[in-house]
Amino acid sequence: MSAEPDRTAFLAAATALLGPRGLTSDPDLVAPWLTDWRGRFTGRALALASPGSTAEVAALVRLCADHGVPIVPQGGNSGMCGGATPDASGGALLLSLRRMDAVRQLDREARRITCEAGMILENLHHAADAAGLRFPLTLGGKGSATVGGLISTNAGGTQVLRHGSMRALVLGIEAVLADGSLFSALTPLKKDNRGFDLKQLLIGSEGTLGIITAATLALVPAVAERIAVWCAVPSVQVARQLLLHCEQALGPALEGFEIMPHASLAAVLAYLPAARAPLAGDHAWHVLIEATADAAGAAALRPTVEEAMTAAFAARLVEDAAFSANESQAEAFWTLRDSVAPAERAKGPAVQHDISVPVERMADFIDHAAPAIEAAFPGVEAVAFGHLGDGNVHFHVIAPPGVEGVAWQEGPGKKISAQVNDMVTAWGGSISAEHGIGQLKLGELERLGDPVALALLRRIKQALDPKGLLNPGKLVRAERAGGRAG
Ligand code: FAD
């Protein structure tokens, strides 16, 4: 900012705009939103704004532009990279979209829903269910993550294999740009060749190019039958063979293909004392397969899955398997899968990596990278789990027992991450498959990213947010005359 903003004048004007319900500086009300879900970043904020409408967001952003006040947009604060956490200066406004959670329109025939950005994913699922339809993206943080956050991080989750990540499901967007103007493109068109697809710029932009206020999302037919199969496999290489087999045998019925090593299942069972292991005995790796069908394909699903698994046994691709007999059993399997992240977090300090390599190389990558890290940093435990079917795993490196968390994460943890990210880059992969960059990975993106791509990111940021007020210090730094800032 060229001049220090007059914070008192700004707060007075913002209070007049939003009223007491829409703006607070009460430390007790603001504090819960100043630390990220993983507890790695804590910041300070000028105030917490909770506008109730798009018009209020637009007026507030204009006010921020006039006063030079930076804005940190926030949804459910379930992001993994500190993207929704302000810095320590206390100069930014934390802008929560959580109050804006209405469904504006649901069109059953066209299978789409238009809702506000603060709608929580789980509520979106319920809204689609109530209409006999389904929103097919889901993830472990579904009770907190909002539509705006999911779009801004281009979230993935466990059903990407069939339905794609958020980008594939967004049909239209409404967003407030840095100067307070409204980009309104909620009406979906099957064909539209008027140049750039501007909404795609906002998807995955982590609040650095605009504030998403609403979106039109694609829905799919409701699931009439679903089967989850928990399999034990001897190695990640065999898991990869099983994936190829399932893709062939199940075709579009294959919705999810998740892996976890024995250590992750053990962590989950310790974290959820009431949970039970689906299979007896110790197995090196576990695979959770989900197959679904709509009403038209429901009757054929179970025989098809059983046939596929019989063939997998015959080919020695599985050591043991358990089929869900009903919805609650399928849910119980998914609870185990969805609990890996919180269970690992409860286990102790770790450095987490959300990485992708070409799908066909992931098994080799895990076999190479985990022992390489454990050899280079004695005492650590490297664990890879997640979306093998998408070539994306969460590669967590757990600290040796007894070390102090933050000091370890900031010291050896950084060296570990650098080595992991170097390997991922050398294997042609991405250091952020689905969680985004935020503040956690900004330095590594700048270190390892293609210079041409990085320059393009900065030019786009400069064009859309010339004052650098939108989520400074996340994803892309704004260029300023005389050097970089924020
Ligand atoms: P926040 O955390 O509040 O914000 C995330 C980013 O988006 C920030 O940069 C923020 O500034 C920006 N933002 C938020 N709302 C807006 C808006 N309206 N306009 C502009 N910018 C905005 N993610 C996956 O992809 N796959 C997974 O499998 C997965 N599993 C998870 C499991 C657990 C247990 C948890 C807690 C999280 C998981 N996540 C996963 C991460 C998380 O749920 C996603 O990143 C989600 O998209 C964040 O949504 P949010 O509303 O909480 O966003």
Image (cartoon, rainbow, N blue to C red):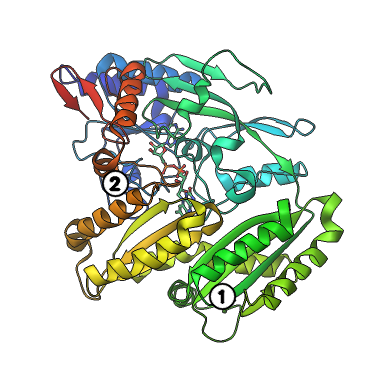
Q: Are marks 2 and 1 in contact (CB under 8 Å)?
A: no
Kind of residue sitting beneath label 1: Val
Question: Which residue is situated farthest in the bottom direction here?
Answer: 281
Name which residue lies at 39% across and 46% down. 430
Crowd rating for badge 2 (residues with CA inside 10 Å; few <14, some 14–19, many 20+): some
Residue 11 against residue 360 in the figure, above or below: above
Under circle 1, the secondary element is: strand
Residue type beneath disc 2: Leu
Q: Which one is in front, 29 or 426?
A: 426
Above or below, 188 relative to 276? above
Q: Is residue 352 left or right of residue 316?
A: left
First in residue order: circle 2 vs circle 1: 1
Which x, y percent locates residue 363? 47, 63
Q: Position of residue 6 (x, y in %)?
A: 19, 19
Q: Which residue is mark 2?
A: 440
- The image quarter containing residue 292 is bottom right
| Res 233 seen here | yes
Compared with 176, 407 (above or below) is below
Describe the element under mark 2 as helix, strand or loop: loop
| Mark 1 lies within 8 Å of ligand 1 (Cβ measured) | no
Looking at the picture, tell me which residue is in the foreground, 438 or 451.
451
> Is residue 53 visible from the viewing direction of this image?
no
323 displayed left or right of 379:
right
Quadrant location of the N terminus? top left
Residue position marked by numbered label 1 in the rendering: 233
